[in-house]
Image (spheres, rainbow, N blue to C red):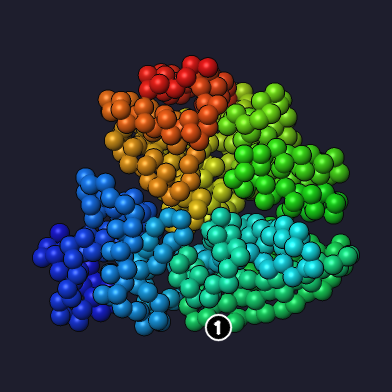
Amino acid sequence: MRDYAFGPFVLDASRGILLRDGAPISIGQRALALLQALLEADGSAVPKAALMDAAWPGIVVEEVNLSVQITALRKALGARDDGQDWIVTVPRVGYRLPLATARAAPASRSGPARIVVLPFANLSDRPGKDYFADGIAEDIITALSRFRTIAVVSRGASFSYKGRAPEPRQVAAELGVDYVLSGSVRHAADRVRVGVELIDGQSGRNLWAERFDAPLVDVFDVQDRITERVIGLVEPRVRKAEIEHARGKRPESLDAYDLYLQALPHFWGVAPDGFATAIALMERALALDPEFPMLVAFAAWAHEKRDTLGLPPLHADPRRGLSLARHGIRISADDPQALVICSTIIMIMGERSETAACLDAAARAYAANPNNLLVCNLLGNLFTGCGGNLDAALAAYERVLALSPGAPEVYEALSGIGTVHYYLGNYSEAVVWLRRSLSTGTEWQPTYWHLVAALVGLGRMEEARQAVAQLLLLAPHSTVAQLRTITSRGGFSRYEAHLLEPLRRAGLPAG
């Protein structure tokens, strides 16, 4: 068993003791097991379920026991030199132990510059304009994500701080980033005021602050100027020409853009009728501007999700999502996110003859920016669904975990890794990863599909039936017939026989 050194501490795993400056510290064996699990993760986030397995192997305990042990461990370790806790809470995931006590200056950094864009505060007189402030922040996330030498924390991780006023160094420690960008938006009549500031995540020093006042029609110019200033400060090696080339196609209609921004919270939300609301708003926007790539991509995605998950109205025409995705491919050559979204939809809903082109388009999106979490997640889905290369799918999902281990979207990568292991025949490994995905607090239907199938493959029928019961609580409409409709088309058709029979044997209604 190896020893671990961090700061003034050494964990002597062979003897089961923790030393500070050579002197032993009295902590319990469960706390030691938790500390070892955090150290083995090498700075990455460790899900709560994995920590509980490490400290209470083979025993089912309440999550409060983990909280008690983490609190005791924090007390024993004390604070780091910067005043922060050694053990960092990763919202909705678990905990991580950052091993570096100091960061290199940006000029000598070996990896990409890491930045989080926090939700912008809405300073407008009308609270209903939150969607506009959120949209500005989301657009800046998208703009920065187009540069391959920058790693931007995902929207989900950023927006987990919405409605809070966290200290920037705390955010940087929790997410493992170099820079924190925050701002505010005041939208009144036909004008907009955007205030932004960029903070060094290590020192908390303000690197840049500026206020932009402009007519509403110039809001996209304001976003471009913010992007240029941030790029110039965090990644000065990026040339002006690259910034010009990376700009996405702007919407032609401000009204369409406003409707698109109104739709996004419903698309990302958890309300059952969210996709229907998002689709209604996006269809109105499409009538005004059918050539805006991100609008086309998200509209197609909303149609696909509603259809794949069997959400009402069940009589909706699934061909609309496919038609939009095919149109999106044609107009999204320079937009990696729109390109990979539309490719994934075609893979799910289109013809098998289209899968090669989908993989090619997604590969181009990845080449444009391998640091974009959405691109990596969906590339993993494409490789899994198209059956093109399960090893490549695994690599794409693992890159998501490496880039942003604390992101809420990590549930999809964890589920994807479990799914790949299932199709490789590694059923025990699949169960571990799929349950880790569920432990993040996000329940996703495909996670349950493959968890049930893996448990059946292991002969653990009672657990499989329990998983089916949980699936039906999440999605009461689920049936074998509904899943056959999904798996019989597009790239997933090759997996139909591997999924439906185990679900039927575990008690999923035939439909």
Confirm whether residue 20 shows in the render: yes
When the figure is inspected, residue 191 is found, relative to residue 147, above or below; the finding is below
Q: Position of residue 157 (x, y in %)?
A: 53, 58
In the rendered picture of this protein, how many numbered marks are placed on residues?
Answer: 1
When the figure is inspected, residue 76 is found, relative to residue 112, above or below; the finding is below
Q: Position of residue 423 (x, y in %)?
A: 38, 30
Which residue is at the front of the view, 246 or 138? Answer: 138
Secondary structure at badge 1 equals: loop
| Residue neighbourhood size for the residue with mark 1, other residues' Cα within 10 Å, grouped as few (<14), some (14–19), many (≥20) | few
Location of mark 1 (residue): 205
Of the 4 image quadrants, the one containing the N terminus is bottom left
Residue at 23% across / 55% down in the picture?
55
Residue at 55% across / 67% down in the picture?
115
Q: Position of residue 227 (x, y in %)?
A: 68, 67
Q: Position of residue 270 (x, y in %)?
A: 59, 45
Residue at 36% across / 83% down in the picture?
81
Locate residue 6 relative to residue 278 in the image: left or right.
left
| Amino acid of disc 1 | Arg
Quarter of the figure with residue 125: bottom right
Confirm whether residue 397 shows in the render: no
Locate residue 332 relative to residue 363 in the image: left or right.
right
When the figure is inspected, residue 499 is found, relative to residue 59, above or below; the finding is above
Locate residue 376 relative to residue 47 in the image: left or right.
right
Locate residue 135 relative to residue 404 in the image: left or right.
right
Quarter of the figure with residue 310: top right
When the figure is inspected, residue 233 is found, relative to residue 259, above or below; the finding is below
Residue at 29% across / 75% down in the picture?
75
